[in-house]
Image (cartoon, helix red, strand yellow):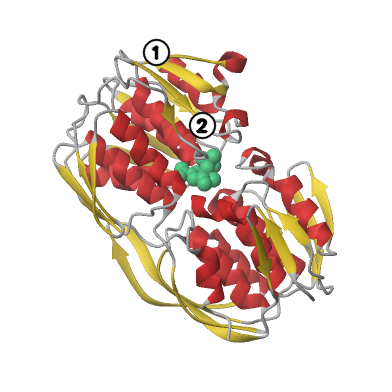
Amino acid sequence: MELTINPAESLRGKVAVPGDKSVSHRAVMFGALAEGITEIEGFLAGEDCLSTVSCLRKLGVRIDETGEGRLQVHGKGLHGLEEPGEALDVGNSGTTIRLMLGILAGQGFFSVLTGDQSIRRRPMARVTLPLAKMGAQILGRQEGNLAPLAVRGGNLQPIAYESPVASAQVKSAVLLAGLYAKGVTEVNEPYVSRDHTERMLRAFGAKVERAGTRVAVEGFPLLKAQRVKVPGDISSAAFFLVAGSIVRDGEIRLTNVGLNPTRDGILTVLAEMGASISRENLTEVSGEPVGDLIVRPAGLTGVKIGGSMIPRLIDEIPVLAVAAAYARGVTEIRDAAELKVKESNRIAAVARELVKLGVRVEELPDGLRIWGGKPLRGADMESSGDHRMAMAMAVAALGAQGTSRIRGAEAAAVSFPDFFAALRRLYP
Ligand code: S3P
C-alpha cells in the first residue's frame, strides 16, 4: 500500500495510543502458564501480539475476545501446554519467537517455530545458546541461529547467564525457561533492558529478584491468573511526540502512556533537545507507571547519545533520527549496532530514507550521524516492511516541503493498526 502524506503546519488533538506491545505479549503468555482465567484490558490487537495469541492457541490454550482490547486467557498452568500438530508461525514478531523459545524449552514435547522473511533472517543464537546450556535441544540453520527452529524441551538445569547484549527478549527467554528449572536461574546484562517480564512475573506469583543489571528467578512457582491493564505504548506515542515538536503550531495530548523508566529514554533525550513535553495524571496501573503527555512545538537542537541510554529508547531511534533531521546542529547516535538486526536494518534504512528527503546522514558501524536543521523536501520513501520505519517516515514528511509517498505503509499494522487515521485526525 502506498500512502500520500502532505506536510502539516499544525497538529492538534488527543490520541489514545494503543496498548503496549511488550506488555500485551507477556500478559497473554503468562496468563497461559497461570492457573485460572487472566483478564486483559487494553490489549494491543496489532499483528505481532495476534501472532502470540495464535501460537498459544495452537498449544491448546483457550483465548476469548470479550470486547475491544479485552481478552480472557484460560490458563493451563505451568504444565498444561499441549504438543502442537503444526508449526507455530510468529509472523514478524521477534518478541513472540524469542519468548516462546523460552517457554517451549521447558516443555517435554516437540515444536517448530517459524515466521516471515524478516524473522527468518534475524539472529536467534542469542536465545538458543543459553537455552541449550539449560538442556533444551534446538535445531535450526546456522547451528540453531535461524528460524525455522525445532525445539525438544524439558529437563532443564538452572544457569547463571552473562548475556553479551542488553536485550529484554534474551533476558525474558532465559527467565521463562528458568520457570522450568529446579533452583535459581540468573541473567546478567551489560545495561538494564526493559523490565516488564520481571514486574509481571512477580505479579503472577513468581519469585523474581533484581540487583542492578542482574535478575534471578526461582523455578516451578505457582502462577496465579491476574487482571492486567495494559498501558499505552510509549513507542507508539513517540511518533506523535516528534510530530508535535517539529510542526509550527498546535498541541497533542497523548493519554494513558506507559512511563516505565526502562522505556522512557525518548522523553529524556527529546527534553535535552529542547522539546516541550509535559506530564499530567501520573498514576500506576498493573505495576506500571502511566500518565498523559502533552507536546507542543519547539525548536530542537542536536544531541549525542549512547551507552545505557540506548536500551531505554532502542525502538524509538528511527523517529528520533527524524527529530534530529529537524534539529539544529549534529546528532550522534552510538552503541546502537542492535538496530541492524531489528525488523529491518534500521541504520541502513533510516540513512537511505532521510537522504531521499535531502538530509545529510552518515551511517556508522554502531549508529548514525545526522546533520539537521536544513529544509527537507518531500520524497518517495519505503518502509522496508518495517512498521517503525513506515511511521517514522510519515512523521518526517510532515515538516518537508511538498508531498511525500510511503510504499509499504501497511507495515504499521504490526504495532499500530490505526496510526495513519490517528495522524490524519490531528490535521486542522
Ligand atoms: C522487546 C525487546 C526489544 C525491543 C522489541 C520488544 C520486548 O528487543 O526492541 O521491540 O518486548 O522484550 P531486544 O530484546 O532484541 O532488544
Residue at disc 2, secondary structure:
loop
Give the residue number, with chain letter if any, for mark 1.
135
Q: Which residue is mark 2?
A: 115
Inspect this view and state whether residue 206 appears: no
For the residue carrying disc 1, how many other residues have a C-alpha within 10 Å: few (<14), some (14-19), or many (20+)?
Answer: many
Residue at image position (39%, 44%) is 50
Residue at horizontal 55%, vertical 59%?
A: 265
Horizontal relation, residue 201 to residue 101: left or right: left
Residue 297 in view:
yes
Answer yes or no: disc 1 within 8 Å of ligand 1.
no
Q: Nearer the viewer, residue 138 or 380?
A: 380
Q: Which callout, 1 or 2, points at the residue further toward the start of the chain?
A: 2
Residue 309: percent from left, percent from top: 59, 53
Label 1 to label 2: alpha-carbon separation: 24 Å
For badge 2, the amino acid type reads Gly
Q: Picture quarter containing residue 313?
A: bottom right
